[in-house]
Amino acid sequence: MLENQTDFSLPIDKLRTIAQTLTEKDIELIICDNSTIKKINAEYRSKNAPTDVLSFPIEGDFDTFPLGSIVISSDMILQKAEQLGHTAQEESTLLFIHGLLHLLGYDHEVDSGEMRAREAELIGTFDLPKSLIVRTEKYKE
């Protein structure tokens, strides 16, 4: 399910292929602006700032329920793509992969590199630019 609250155009076919590679479950994808993601980030993570991607897994083992929701800021997509020298479609795909891995239980803040390794593998498979994790460490603001 896609809810695009912006004019941003997503590479839907590529995102669908990535999702189907990693899970049989449905995923809700919401694209919003910085103002909206800032409110969500404040409410659910107590961080009063916009962020690029948030993931909300659905708890429990319900066969018919989606895996969870991924919320991505279109403003951050455009900003990071320009800053890092790749396309907005590549950036949105990177953020989708990052969010999807969180839905699948990966957590780069506490794991021993498993998420980074899986992300790097998927980035290679789908011919994308640098990993979100690697570049975030390099380009911290």
Image (cartoon, grey):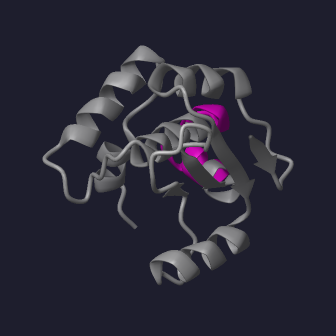
User: In screen coordinates, is 125 left or right of 110?
Assistant: right
Look at 31% across and 46% down and name the residue there. 106
Look at 53% across and 65% down and name the residue there. 51
User: Is residue 84 magenta-colored?
Assistant: yes
For the residue pair 109 and 8, the one nearer the viewer reads as: 109
Q: Position of residue 88 (x, y in %)?
A: 65, 38
Look at 70% across and 28% down and name the residue there. 11
Position of the C terminus by quadrant: bottom left
Q: Position of residue 52 (x, y in %)?
A: 55, 58
Position of the N terminus by quadrant: top right
Q: Position of residue 7 (x, y in %)?
A: 86, 48
Q: Position of residue 72 (x, y in %)?
A: 62, 53
Q: Give the answer, above or below, for where 39 lies relative to 26.
A: below
Q: Residue 101: which quarter of the image?
A: top left
User: In screen coordinates, is 113 left or right of 4?
Assistant: left
Q: In this view, which residue lies farthest toward the left?
A: 112
Q: Residue 92: which quarter of the image?
A: top right
Query: Which residues lie in the magenta part?
Result: 78-90
User: Is residue 21 magenta-colored?
Assistant: no
Q: Give the answer, above or below, for where 24 lies relative to 102.
A: above
For the residue pair 4 and 1, the one nearer the viewer reads as: 1
Q: Give the answer, above or below, for where 110 lies relative to 9.
A: below
For the residue pair 84 and 109, the one nearer the viewer reads as: 109
What is the total number of numbered labels drawn onto the structure image? Answer: 0
Q: Main secondary structure of the magenta part?
A: helix
